[in-house]
Image: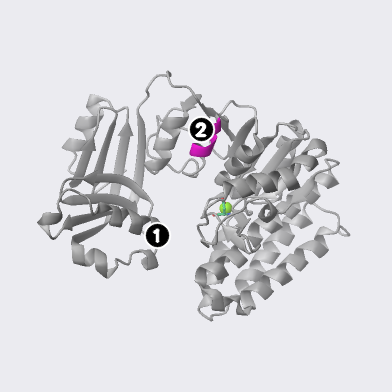
Amino acid sequence: MIQPFIFKFGGASIQDSDSFIRIVEILKAHWHNGLVVVVSAAGDTTDHLENSIHLAWNNQPYGETIDALEEYHLGICSALFPEDHAIYRQLPNDFVKLRKTLASERKLEGYAYFYDQVIGYGELISTRILQELLCLKGNYCIWQDARELIATDSNYKMANVDWVMTMQRCRKYLADKLETFPVITQGFIGSDWQGTTTTLGREGSDFTAAILAVSLGAKSVTIWKDVAGILNGDPDLFPDAVKFDYLDFEEAAEMTYFGAKVIHPKTIKPLAKQKIPLHVKSFLDPASSGTVIGSFEDHPKIPITVIRKDQVLATFRIKDLSKAGGFHFHELFELGKKSNWTIHLTQGSAVTLKLVLDKPDPANEFLPKSILENFHVLWQEGLTLVTVKNYLPEQEKMYETESAGIHLVQKSPATMQLVLANWEG
Ligand code: ASP
Ligand code: MG
């Protein structure tokens, strides 16, 4: 079996016709059977689809949003394809299906289900455009529906991967094709055992690339982004941030846990387990080296700063002190998992657990009665989490002397985390 390599392109890399051309050039330079190209929805399509889902769900008019999306995609095509090309039949067809899905009674099955049936059209359409464009330019490749590959449970909007089934499906539907042709497929979407569409959570296309890499035993994964690679801080906040040439899997995984937005948090772990290197490269400057994430345990520890805004500090204090010792905290982690909380810091004592998390959707802020019966809860919003890994003594002082309103500090020899009220960065 051929050992594939996986490329992933996000929405920003295909936001207009020029960027599609740029991606085609990159792909041509790496054209080879065994290449699997995972693609997100073009530009901000997913945000617009999310908006239309919200409107449809609330019985408000959403037609204009969809019309604008169709116009946007057709506009991209008009600069890329001749007038009589089949894409002009394919695309309107996809939009007919999308409108039908939005209008259909599927709403009766619950919001998350409805959401997943609609939201993936962005990817289904963008991959069509890319595949047809490559073929038009003489680079024959196959369009593959990712829902035939990525097997999940039915936890809509945040489905969990069935790794064994996915591996079987990849071998069945993909391995042979890859012997001869590159394959273009969608990020973000999968299907459950009934064949119903599911999604892996927003920005989940990086994770799709990792799932396919593991399932196919890939040589490497390359995520193409609009930045030079992974930097040790957000360049908008830290102008002298430096790019890593190499980064250890563990450091990269920690960065995503602390809230760095470089790569989807679920991406690193499966790749680390199989030791499949992950390249992060710039689609604006494809010849530059980017960052390689792999097993580089001995490389020098450079300070890494991650700033995460809009954080909630949730403090849970046990009411009945005879239950002290933290044995009841598992209820809180279970709740967090069920409610899809994204937690970036935990701090526990015998009677108190503090969690720092992204502000959840209103529906997922709900605290059940059992939790309120067992814990005093303090829920503080609008805070900033600063994490400095491999911190230097001067950084320690810098943050602590700032009149920043420190709500919490947590330090280990390797990592310092602070929750601040007034972050001016
Ligand atoms: N298009 C989806 C989103 O914007 C998935 C992705 O981009 O990774 O969330
Ligand atoms: Mg996207």
317 or 221, nearer to the observer:
317
Q: Secondary structure at mark 1?
A: helix
Left/right placement of residue 54 relative to residue 304 reads: right
> Which of the numbered marks, if any, corresponds to residue 272?
2
Of the pair 198 and 382, the residue shown nearer to us: 198
Q: Position of residue 19 (x, y in %)?
A: 67, 45
> What residue sits 27% from the left and 39% below the top?
417
Kindly indicate the quadrant of the structure image that contains residue 65: bottom right
Residue 244 in view, yes or no? no
Rendered-image quadrant of the N terminus: top right
Residue in the picture at 71% in, 35% down: 26
Q: Horizontal and vertical percent for residue 327? A: 22, 50
- Residue in the foreground of this view, choosing between 245 and 110: 110
Task: Pinpoint residue 101: horizontal percent, then vertical percent.
Answer: 65, 73
Q: Which residue is mark 1?
A: 338
- Left or right relative to 219: residue 259: left
Q: Is residue 219 left or right of residue 1?
A: left
Q: Amino acid at mark 1?
A: Lys
Of all residues shown, which one is farthest toward the right? Answer: 84
For numbered disc 2, what is the local secondary structure? helix
Give the residues in magenta: 269-274
| Image height of 320 relative to 299, above or below | below
- Identified at 62% across, 38% down, the residue is 213
Identify residue type, mark 2.
Ala
The stretch drawn in magenta includes residue 270: yes
Mark 2 touches mark 1? (CB < 8 Å): no
Q: Taking 390 as reference, is 56 left or right?
A: right
Quadrant holding the C terminus: top left
Whether residue 15 is visible here, answered yes or no, is yes
